Image (cartoon, grey):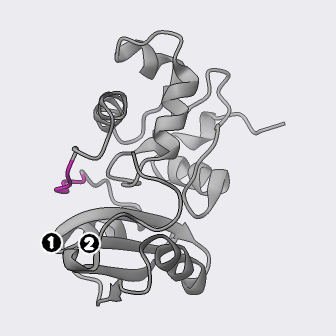
């Protein structure tokens, strides 16, 4: 499991990152060589997303121009296009429970939502809705693993650890056409 603070990736991994503006805010992708290690979405300012990435991965992480399929798909998604994300990343850094949660979350279709409780039942862990929420809060691949599509059992949003918090979660669900049915937090 990853600890708080700087990533355990080393300078030898060739850490790079790209940042780009979208309709949902500033987004970024971090790579170790050619392998994607993190996606950040929905930051209001360039400085805030860059500070977050450098705090987590250190100053040895080199900024590069945004390019590639993941960047293009994030831009298309943010502009309202239905996108099926395909991205290569390693499952080895996740616990068995996280892998189950993330794989099931990836099966939630565009424009649909699941509750934390129903996701827990689908992976065979009835009653583990809080653990599902904790796993999703650690999701390093926002949008690719669409944790924004998981809501509370009472229909309220629940948390969202991406740059724009629950306001961004609501915006993403509205973008997908699902947000109109969600209740506002009281």
Kindly identify which residue carries mark 1. 34
Residue 12 location, quadrant: bottom left
Residue at 20% in and 51% down: 90
Residue 76 locus on image (x, y percent): 32, 67
Quarter of the C terminus within the rendering: top right
Q: Is residue 22 above or below residue 145?
A: below
Residue 28 location, quadrant: bottom left
Regarding mark 2 in the picture, which secondary structure is present there?
strand
20 left or right of 72 in image: right
Of residues 142 and 182, the one drawn nearer to the viewer in this rendering: 142
Residue 129 locus on image (x, y percent): 54, 21
Discs 2, 1 touching: Cβ within 8 Å: yes
Residue 105 tag number: none
Of residues 116 and 79, the one drawn nearer to the viewer in this rendering: 116
Is residue 26 at least partly visible in the picture? no
Regarding mark 1 in the picture, which secondary structure is present there?
loop
Q: Which residues are magenta?
A: 85-90
41 left or right of 76 in image: right
Q: Residues within 10 Å of mark 1 (few under 14, many from 20)?
A: few
Of residues 15 and 175, the one drawn nearer to the viewer in this rendering: 15
Q: Is residue 70 above or below residue 67?
A: above
Residue 80 location, quadrant: bottom left
Say how many tags the image has. 2
Magenta stretch secondary structure, dominant: loop
Residue at 28% in and 55% down: 83
| Mark pair 2, 1: CA separation | 6 Å
Residue 131 included in the magenta stretch of the image: no
Q: Residues within 10 Å of mark 2 (few under 14, many from 20)?
A: some
Residue at 58% in and 64% down: 163
Residue at 43% in and 34% down: 112
Kindly identify which residue carries mark 2. 31
């Amino acid at each position: 499991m990853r600890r708080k603070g700087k990533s355990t990736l080393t300078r030898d991994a060739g850490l790079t990152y790209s940042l780009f503006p979208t309709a949902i805010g500033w987004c970024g992708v971090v790579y170790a060589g050619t392998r994607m290690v993190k996606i950040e979405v929905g930051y209001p300012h360039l400085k805030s997303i860059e500070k977050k990435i450098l705090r987590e991965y250190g100053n040895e992480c080199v900024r590069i121009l945004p390019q590639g399929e993941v960047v293009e798909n994030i831009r298309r998604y943010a502009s309202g296009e239905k996108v099926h994300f395909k991205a290569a990343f390693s499952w080895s850094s996740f616990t068995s429970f996280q892998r189950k949660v993330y794989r099931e979350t990836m099966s939630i279709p565009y424009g649909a939502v699941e509750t934390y409780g129903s996701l827990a039942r689908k992976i065979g862990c009835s009653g583990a809705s809080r653990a599902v929420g904790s796993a999703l809060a650690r999701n390093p691949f926002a949008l690719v693993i669409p944790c924004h599509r998981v809501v509370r059992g009472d229909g309220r949003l629940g948390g969202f650890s991406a740059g724009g918090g629950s306001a961004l979660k609501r915006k993403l669900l509205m973008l997908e056409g699902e947000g109109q049915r969600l209740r506002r937090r009281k």
